Amino acid sequence: MNTEQWEVMVGNKAIAYAAKMARVKYISAFPITPQTTIVQYLAEMIANGELDAEFVTVEGELTAQASALTAAAAGVRVFTATSGPGLLYMHHPMHATSGARLPIVMAVVHRSVKGMQPDHSDMMAQRDTSWMMFECENSQELLDTGIMAFKIAEDERVRLPAIFSGDGYILSYTAEPVELPLQEEVDAFLPPYKSSIPLLPEQAEEMRMYMMRMWGFERDPQFAWKAQQDAMESAKAVIKEVNEEYGKWFGRSYGNGLVEEYMCEDAEAVIVAMGTIASTARTAIKNLRKGGKRIGLVKLKSFKPFPGEEFKRIGENVDAIGVIDRNVSCGSGGIIFGEVRNSMYDLEVRPKTLEFYAGLCGKEVRVSDIEKVAEKTLMAARGKAVAPTVEWV
Amino acid sequence: MSKPIPLIKLGDEEFIDPANQACQGCAGSIVARIVSKALGTRMVRQEVACCGPAFGNIRAPSIYAEVFEGAGAMMTGLSRAYKRLGRDDIIVTGIIGDGGTVDIGLQGLSAAAERNENVLWIVYDNEAYMNTGGQRSSSTTKYAATTTTPVGEMSRGKRERKKNVPLLVATHNVPYTATASVAYPEDLFGKLEYAKNIKGFRYIHISAPCPTGWSFDPKDTIKVGREMVLSGLWPLYEVIDGKTIRQTYKPKELKPVRGVLKMQGRFRHITDTEVDEIQQEVNDFWGRLTAKDGGPFF
Amino acid sequence: MLEIRFHGRGGQGAVTGVRVLATALYYDGKFTQGIPMYGTERRGAPVVSFLRVGEERINERDLVHEPDLVVVLDPLLGQTVPVTDGLKKGGLVLINHPRGGRETGLGGPFKVATVDATKIAMEVLGRPITNTAILGAFAKVTGLVTLESLEKAVLKQWSGNIGNVNVRAVKRAYDEANDPVDVSDVEGIRVRELGVMDRDVSSWRLFRPEIDAGKCVGCRRCYIFCPEVAIAMAENKAEINYAYCKGCGICFEECPVKAIAFKQEEI
């Protein structure tokens, strides 16, 4: 690990660096605010010889995804990036990518599907595409997670595509110092890419057998779904391994890779958040702790696969959990709220749960907002009646 | 310029397995056979939803992904990846139906052509979404009965004229654009031979009559194809680099369109006035085409 | 509640036929549930559909695995499709066939009734679409639906002349259907079920091309036009591999020297 390289850069540049250091060979992306500059940085890197890759200025996000999938199938490491409606537009081929078990890595700079400012509705709309999803709270984490994502996705035990994401504007255009790993070290950490689909002419017979296995008539029609679900389950261990290995190589790791527990020792209650809200929450929690309040933060990093076991474990030791969702599935509720509750259902004694919607369509989330969320959660932990249990922050 | 290849000059080797699950008399199957024979083992294909998978007995590797609109995108990804891998021997090909080319696939087609992707786009045009039962496409001839343009008191079949996509592709100034027909295999083999030896975006649009969808006896597939060419309904030509256009088969006189239209059940209802309308258009286009033959395209 | 399975080929109208039958049964006061099996329903490829018939609304939505009755619209289907699989003991098969129930190649603990629906269809409709003819026979041998309701249902499906002509086919088949006969002592033919790698489409044929080698000039038109790649050149003569021939007739039509004959397949 060498910390001599660093630069003050915006989040989008950190994302571009992740792709560059992973030595991707095929990039296809279509501009959409607030992702656009990622693609421009990469174009510049290619134009001045820093990055040797195919760069296709595709006519739309659907083509970005669909062409990335065949390029990955043919045998090169690929990268694409998008936001909000662009992510929606590529929904169709996203299922093809995961169905074909292609380990593509895609950066998503969050943009609401209902506006230009950030929330997690774009990612949530793709929740069921069998893509892994890793949320980041700062630009450093974007760079590191991008590199890790390739390793996790390409692992034999996983072979699923992955999104690594961060909130648009808040991260994409905000400048922070970011440490860059050495290229040689990334090369050693991340082995070269190999396709698992025999798509060269000399592999015609192998391809026939592959197709038989994939589309075989004796095969249980549920096979593909089961395989994807099994891969997601296996991914949990791989995520933890890669996170730990990354820490050894580069001196930075993120909780256990799935979640990070911040000031949760002896906590009576915890709040749960993803991404930049979790970042702001750290300050709120620190403030409350200074005041003697026993409150902690669980930062959710791996949204998919969802680490239910982690929450079950955490739920055993606290009396209340306040979940902050930067999304709402209208007609149901916040998605992380539902997942957290679901994971704790089998506990003998279940903590109270509270739902908070915050930051939708980019509404500012302040330290004081989160302090209030935390206070309310603490009150619930103490058995004090707290109404309502669903709140728009 | 392409040159027709006499059938006796063709090699004996096949690159396709015999018998498939397509309809009796399927012209798409004939296209698959001809293309695989011409491109041999150098081909890697990409497939989208169409009748293709039903007659998909070509031996060369192919990736099928459930992205109907993505033919252009998927060919692009393959081609760029093979370039990175140093495999310039591979011919990235798509044998795509009219639906995946002229309708839902049009954006991807135009974009791939505009980027001059190094791919060979082959269309087998059966003038409808045949795989899903025969719904109209923008490649369906006017007045044809299809399941979404049925004939009844309030409807005379498809209202719109057949969209001319070959000319549209040619205006992208790609290295090669051509029309062909299953009924003229020597011409088609010649065009495939020419296309396979150059790089960049190549497009061959093949008329492939469909006995099931057009309602005629399967034994007449080639006959209907031939009559379409002889009547000027489907002229055979090629455009090089978007600059010069040349008719590759030019009957001295066109046969009246009525003959070939009446061979097909999908035009069973057509009136003389409607036939005349189609005849007028054919004559008009033929006149303009022959005036340009051998000279500048635009 | 009764369960029926239909076997046909794409293009024989199996799906429409079942719908017409269901309509007729409804006229007779019965509830039905018709399940077509959609695949790539190509003209000529084997298709299956199911029909449940009961006195009240039918709730089960799974497939029919043990039919009481099996209807087969094509005389050669039984060679490659196990049409009697799952048929209940004492059940009934109605098959479109030119000969009697004991000569269809089907054998087992059930009865077989036949009707030459192809002949009736060709003579009455001019095309080998056997669905209405088979329904007429169905009414006769099973007694499950009345002829009157069947006629009503046919006219509801097709109006004008087409309707009338189909009613004639129904009536003729009703008259000409052979009574069911027991086949428990008949040795059924071994079904040569086609695996995924099998490429045998010979049972798709109604007609069969035959090349006169003497007349063949080796022009290779039939060779290149065969959609199934069933024709190979041997010493400059075209030869057909019948396992791969669907009987489409293109070779017959395109031979410039008329060296190919096109004859009806013998069943």
Image (spheres, coloured by chain):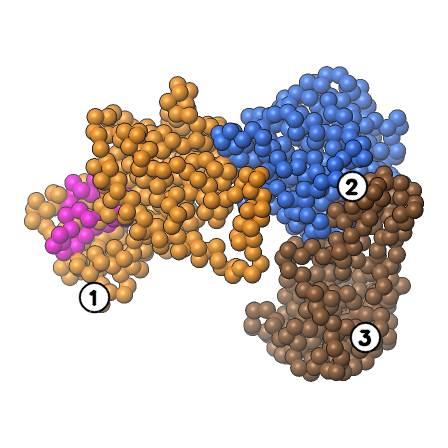
Dot 1 amino acid type: Val
Chain letter for brown, please.
C
Could you tell me residue C126's position as x and y percent? 87, 59
Q: Which mark is residue B197?
A: none
| Label 2 residue SS | helix
Residue A278: in magenta span: yes
Q: Residue A252: x and y, percent?
A: 22, 38
Q: Which chain is blue?
A: B
Residue at image position (37%, 22%) is: A50
Side of A22 relative to C156 (left or right): left
A344 to the left or right of A16? left
Label 2 chain ID: C
Residue at 70% over, 42% down: B14
- Amino acid bearing label 2: Ile
Same subunit, labels 2 and 1: the answer reads no
Residue bearing the label numbered 2: C224
**Residue that carries the numbered disc 3 in the rendered image:** C103
Compared with A282, C37 (above or below) is below
Residue A114 drawn at (x, y percent): 40, 40
Tell me the shade of chain A. Answer: orange
* Location of residue B52 (image quadrant): top right
Q: Secondary structure at mark 1?
A: loop
Of the pair B101 and C254, the residue shown nearer to us = C254
The quadrant holding residue B68 is: top right
Which amino acid lies under the numbered mark 3 shown in the image of this protein?
Glu
The segment highlighted magenta reads A257-285
Have a look at marks 1 and 3 and say if they share a chain.
no
Q: Is residue B264 left or right of residue B162?
A: right
Q: Would you place residue A287 above or below residue A308 in this image?
A: above
**Tag of residue A349:** 1
